[in-house]
Amino acid sequence: MTNLELQKTANEVRKGIVTAVHSAKAGHPGGSLSAADMFTYLYFEEMNIDPADPRKDDRDRFVLSKGHTAPGLYSALANRGYFPVEDLKTLRHLGSYLQGHPCMQETPGVDMSSGSLGQGISAAVGMAVAGKMDNKDYRVYTLLGDGEIQEGQVWEAAMFAGANKLDNLVVIVDNNGLQIDGKVEDVCSVYPIDKKFEAFNFHVINIDAHNFDEIRAAMKEAKETKGMPTAIVMKSVKGKGVSFMEDKAGWHGKAPNDEEYAVAMADLEKIGEELAKGGNA
């Protein structure tokens, strides 16, 4: 896909996020929106996957370690064809297969149930080890929040991955700078993120989370890196694309009301119109 096609798709993913959370009257829009471009690149460009065969043996794996941003993952999966986009409106509803956190037993395309922060990366590391042991070519991707990496288990997993030279593993950190209680640096600073991963024997790449050229280059570099896992630290804007949500910690885990939903969708429609003209939004 071209960058323009990816931008258009990411905008549709963002519409799905806002619609799902509004319909649920609960959920986590901020961190879903900040990672929407990465979700889009992974599912529409990077990963070896097949929506018609979600469990195919040689597929690449993805683990959403920051599982509360399930609306972002679900919207990407729906737009990629794993299930109807219309079903996003059932998020968190009783009986829906789109639970508040990803469930591998219920949702097509979900490779690992997640939500307890810090644990997803460990599951991803296990998948990467299994791939090595079985001489498989699949790659494993996992997305973490910058607040999440305050968890000790993250660094146990990172230490193991680095020590075992898991070059089939890509750890992505969504560095939007905010968590539920405010700025990450004020709650419990995780900086410098890149130097920490380097100390655990990772190849580290810093990028702009909303620049598809940089995302593309980082993924290429990760594939070409041998003998060590890669960490992509992406600087992002929490709530990206929705004017009143951008860079606001209050939108970490809150649903828009009807009036706010209308404004959010108008923002995204405007971005879509700009992209339709062939320009950057």
Image (cartoon, helix red, strand yellow):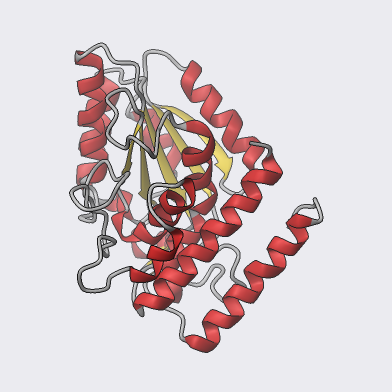
Figure quadrant of residue 100: bottom left
In the image, what residue occupies the spot 46% across and 80% down? 256
Q: Nearer the viewer, residue 154 or 31?
A: 31
Horizontally, residue 243 falls left or right of residue 134, namely right
Please tell me whether residue 50 is drawn above or below residue 138 in the rendered image: below
Please tell me whether residue 215 is drawn above or below residue 253 in the rendered image: above
Q: Number of labelled discs? A: 0
Q: Is residue 96 visible?
A: yes
Coordinates of residue 230 in the picture (x, y in percent): 42, 28
Coordinates of residue 129 in the picture (x, y in percent): 22, 22
Horizontally, residue 66 falls left or right of residue 80, namely left
Figure quadrant of residue 96: bottom left
Image quarter in which the C terminus is found: bottom right
Coordinates of residue 74 in the picture (x, y in percent): 38, 55
Q: Is residue 239 visible?
A: no
Horizontally, residue 269 falls left or right of residue 187, namely right
Please tell me whether residue 204 is drawn above or below residue 210 in the rendered image: above
Horizontally, residue 64 falls left or right of residue 45, namely left
Image quarter in which the N terminus is found: top right
Extreme-bottom residue of the structure: 259
In the image, what residue occupies the spot 62% across and 45% down? 6
